[in-house]
Image (cartoon, rainbow, N blue to C red):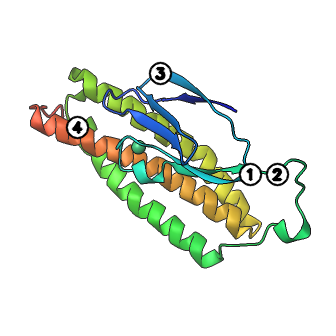
Amino acid sequence: MTIHLTNLERAQDETHGFTVSTMNVHASVEPGKTVTVKFKADKEGVYPYYCTEFCSALHLEMQGYLLVKPKGWKPGKSEAAKAVYTEADYKATVKKVADTQVVIDSVVGYITSVNFKDFPDVVNMVDDATDQLGKMKEAKAKHEAAAAKKDWDQANLWAEQVWQYQVKAADIGLRAKTYLEQNGAKKVK
Ligand SMILES: [Cu+2]
């Protein structure tokens, strides 16, 4: 099995790592670089994979499961999708998204009130954060469409996706703010 990993960050300190538990697969990916890992996944099972570099506030979210199915496996009736989330879960996630947006708006307000463009490191961070916020629109449209159909699983999952983009953006924004404060940024208006 071959996996190509690209680190889309621009901020220079955002190195990401990758490992698949018990498969002896390890990679470290610098910002802007692509790394390829090859390994044999020939034993059926569920293998956690995760980031091994402490990268950001979302570090602990950088994980998932590699499912290796037995040869010839087909889904049976018992594997049919079962609803996991409720309308209340979805509403709680939407509330969390709204609360996080308040933090983002305040950080963006600060950054744009100073001469951040004079700091190349901060310009990179702002580009990374803007990328994250740009991805929110599509995920937001998906959670709203799912909610309209009362598909609370999809609605909640896409709302959580919006929140992940937000947390990432907020984390970068707060680091940019700290950097600007410590390096004598000046008010521009
Ligand atoms: Cu990480």
Relative horizontal placement of residue 46, taking residue 89 as reference (left or right): right
Q: Residues within 10 Å of mark 3 (few under 14, many from 20)?
A: few
Circle 4 sits in a helix, a strand or a loop, which is it?
Answer: loop
Circle 1 sits in a helix, a strand or a loop, which is it?
Answer: loop
Q: CA distance from mark 4 to mark 2?
A: 57 Å
**What's the amino acid at mark 1?**
Glu
Instruction: Please tell me the numbered disc located at residue 70.
Output: 2
Which residue, given by chain and number where applicable, does mark 3 sit on?
33
Residue 31 picture quarter = top left
Residue 104 screen position, x and y as percent:
35, 50
Q: CA distance from mark 3 to mark 4?
A: 32 Å
Of badges 1 and 3, the one in the foreground is 1
**What's the amino acid at mark 3?**
Lys
Circle 2 sits in a helix, a strand or a loop, which is it?
Answer: loop
Instruction: Please tell me the numbered disc located at residue 44.
Output: 1
Closer to the chain start, of discs 4 and 2, is 2
Closer to the chain start, of discs 4 and 1, is 1
Of badges 3 and 4, the one in the foreground is 3
